[in-house]
Structure formats: structure tokens, C-alpha cells
Image: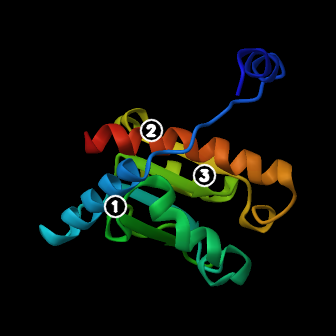
Amino acid sequence: MDAARLHMLEAMGIDVYALRARTVATKIANAADASLATGPASTRLAVVCARSARADARLARLFKHLPHTLGVSAGAISWLEADVNGELDDVADAPAYLVLGAAMARALGAQLSTMQQNTATIAVTADPAHLPGIAADKRALWQALKPVARRLRGAAG
């Protein structure tokens, strides 16, 4: 793109992203595979959701691609599902938490110590029913994922 077009897009508040080189993507995939090969991966991301959210077919694609999107192995993600009362039983200690819905954020906040809340990156998305919705909801989801991805990149390096 030329400089004038980039300047115009910047003035409109649009971030222009360049595709990663295939070698960078391959390095990320190899690093994820290496962490699996060295033994059980420690939890790097905890996804907090209602028990019914993981069974929702509309969210299956999001959950399937989440490890690749964030650059971690599937084994490094811990799924914390709330019971029917909306309470979490066992909360894993992780550098980053992805929370699906405000109700789950309250449940997680009740389980984490103040120190954990201050040191962890906690991203709260809209309720799972709204995630596969309109474009604005999808944009909000990606905005919530950005700090988590940054934290996970920083924790790996």
C-alpha cells in the first residue's frame, strides 16, 4: 500500500495488518509442538465458561481455532466450566484468563486472590450467545483476544 492510503486508514482508526511470513507461523507451530513433546504443558491460558458453552455448536469453530489463534498448544489451555449454579470449583493458576461472559467474570473474581487478579491478564468477552453474532460482536471478541495473545507471546519468550 502507498503512504497516502496508509495515512488515510490510520486517520479513520483502522489498523492495517501485514500477513506473517510462513516461517514465523512455522516457528510458532514448532514451538507449540516442542512444548507438547517435553512433557505435560503447564497451563498458560484458562478459558472460563458456562458448562453449556463448550457444547454449543455455534462456538465449536472458535474453540477449535483458539489455540492456533493465540499461538499455544491445545494442552496449554485449561477449560474451567462453571456448574449449574454458576460457580467454579477448581481454578487453575495461569498467566492469562479468557472469560466468556460477565457472569463468569464474577465467578472467576470470587475464586482468584487479589495478587492473581493483578498479575494475570484477564480478558472478558460478551456472553457466549452473542459471540457468533454480528460483526461488532466479532470485533469486540478480537479486541479482547489481543491482550491475551500479547501476554502469551511474552510468557513464551
What distance separates the C-alpha of mark 1 from that of mark 3? 34 Å
- 60 above or below 23? below
Q: Earlier in the sequence, mark 1 or mark 3?
A: 1
From what the image shows, is residue 132 above or below residue 51?
Answer: above
Element under disc 3: helix
Q: Are marks 1 and 2 in contact (CB under 8 Å)?
A: no
Q: Residues within 10 Å of mark 3 (few under 14, many from 20)?
A: few
Mark 2 or mark 3: name the one nearer the start of the chain.
Answer: 3
Residue at point 29% right, 41% down?
Answer: 155
Q: Quadrant of the N terminus?
A: top right
Residue shown at 84% from the left, 22% from the top: 12
Question: Any mark on residue 29, and which?
Answer: 1
- Name the residue beneath numbered marker 3: 106
Q: Is residue 20 above or below residue 132?
A: above
Q: Amino acid at mark 1?
A: Ala
The residue positioned farthest toward the front in the image shown: 2
Q: CA distance from mark 1 to mark 2?
A: 16 Å
